Amino acid sequence: MVLLPEKLPRDPDQLIEIILDLRSEVETLRTSVATLKTMIFGPRSERSALIVAEQLSLGLDGDETNAAMPAPANDDSAAVQTAQTRKGRRKAQRNIGALPEHLPRVEQTIEPETTVCPCCAGRLHRIGETVSETLDRVAAVLRVLRTIRPKYACRACEEAVVQAPAPPRLIESGMASTALVAWVAAAKYAWGSTLYRQALILAGQGVSIDRQTLARWMKRTAWMLQGLYLAQIAAMHAHPRLFCDETPVRVLDPGRGRTKICQFWAHATDDRSWKGPAPPAVAYIFAGGRGKKEIAGQLAGFEGVLQVDGYAAYTALAGDKTHAGKIQLAFCLVHARRNFVKVHKTTNSPFAKEVIERIGAVYAIEKKIRGLDAAQRRAVRQAETKPLMEALKARFEETKDGISRGSTLVKAIDYALERWAGLTLFLEDGRLEPDTNTVERSIRPISIGKKNSLFCGDEGGGQTWAIIASLLNTAKMNGLDPESYLTDVLERMVSGRTTNDRLHELLAWNWKPDCLAQPAKAAA
């Protein structure tokens, strides 16, 4: 509303109130414009939001868990990982001086053109050699697997005919082996390649397979893996600590001639930071919405601490009579920090910068205690982190009273204070993390897949995506090659070597290749 001079009051106090309201409105609009510019033109990484030069990146890119994750393949990785630049950034990891020892070696010997001495024409004798190694790749080769089943008959009676039964296949009466289907699934759901691109890759090798055929293969694969998928979710929910997040996905809605918005919910566990029992795992659940009803159905049997962001559906879930006393919420300190980052980037607020520095000090302590057991982590947090958080809360309370209620800074402060009990729950329990970075990292493959695939063909496609992606990305989190893992799992399930009552053996953190599992089974 435009204020004309003749409409302005003459009371100085009223003018001051109008000025303050307009200033608050201008600040809000500036914040909105800056946020939109960042979304459209700005960098996506959380690292770009650093305000203090020496502050940690809060582990969103996985640096915080490097010490607990499986060692990289390159042999010199330990030296490379510990080396850091003066600015605190890790040096680029390179294979300097050695290549991974676990890779097979293929030797080629290059002899000189002649072994005759150029001086006296005598015979030269080998006195040594120079060895160098280069990383090589053998191109993928499509082949036709011919299965021959001889028939045997008795010449005496001419009645009995014996022939081995045809081995069961994932795609019955189809032309695809289990390994080929696993390759397609891993390429799409583990590495983000679309079925359209894979059809082109196959066409480049002279094999024409329709994209819809590949989609049917994926549907059949998900049907076969559904029991294992449910077993993984049950195993994860048996632990009393669970991370949860959600992300939207577009699904075709033919009746309306457009797409509709559905959701992928991500449940994650990972106790490696304190050497706890919960394995690194993620389970995606496809749902039609992101309300309390959906998350309540997913967590019907869960009891414990749910580590989440500030979304209202989680608060409603914890306050519901059905889940009262069963679910306790631990909120994310990184999400609270992001609000102050936005304020500082738009208003250059000194107080916002102060808050970011204080939270950076908390994460400096977290970096120091990562890898210790739960009791040690709690003791350090009580002695060092708790006073920092109490001082931060006091600063919030004394600052908010002197700021306009419409200010974005007050909104950031209110977000933190309203969730303070959940934000500081990690101080009382060394098993908890101060943030939800674990599940945010785990949901990235879904985000990449959404950018590449744009939408799901139908809700069945979303369910297929959730099942296969859950198992493959959990395999990746456990240091496994997802294609090899899926091929072995499917072959053992299709053949019946692993029955439904032994599906726990195929969970990524329990899995061993069939060639290793068979001798152990025989010995038992």
Image (cartoon, helix red, strand yellow):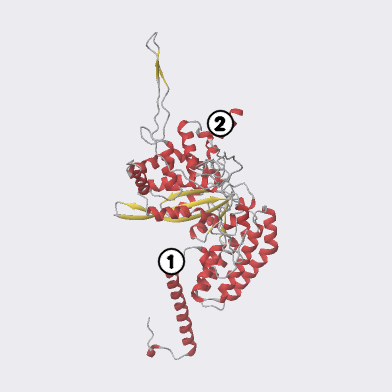
Query: Is residue 177 positioned above or below 281 on the image?
Result: above
- Relative to residue 255, is residue 32 drawn left or right? right
Which residue in the structure is indicated by mark 2? 518
Query: Is residue 400 positioned above or below 171 on the image?
Result: below
**What residue sits 54% from the left and 53% below the top?**
243
* Kind of residue sitting beneath label 2: Gln
Cα distance between the residues tagged 2 and 1: 53 Å
- Relative to residue 393, is residue 138 drawn left or right? left
Can residue 524 be seen here? The reply is no
Tell which of 265 and 69 is nearer to you.
69
In the rendering, at what x and y percent does residue 488 appear? 49, 37
Q: Residues within 10 Å of mark 2 (few under 14, many from 20)?
A: few
Residue 39 image label: 1
Tell which of 488 and 88 is nearer to you.
88
In the rendering, at what x and y percent does residue 517 appear? 56, 34
**What residue sits 52% from the left and 54% below the top?**
439
* Secondary structure state at the residue bearing disc 1: helix
In the rendering, at what x and y percent does residue 30 appear? 44, 75
Tell which of 7 and 101 is nearer to you.
101
* Kind of residue sitting beneath label 1: Met
Task: Give the mark, 2 or 1, whose residue is nearer the N terminus.
Answer: 1
| Rendered-image quadrant of the C terminus | top right
| Rendered-image quadrant of the N terminus | bottom left
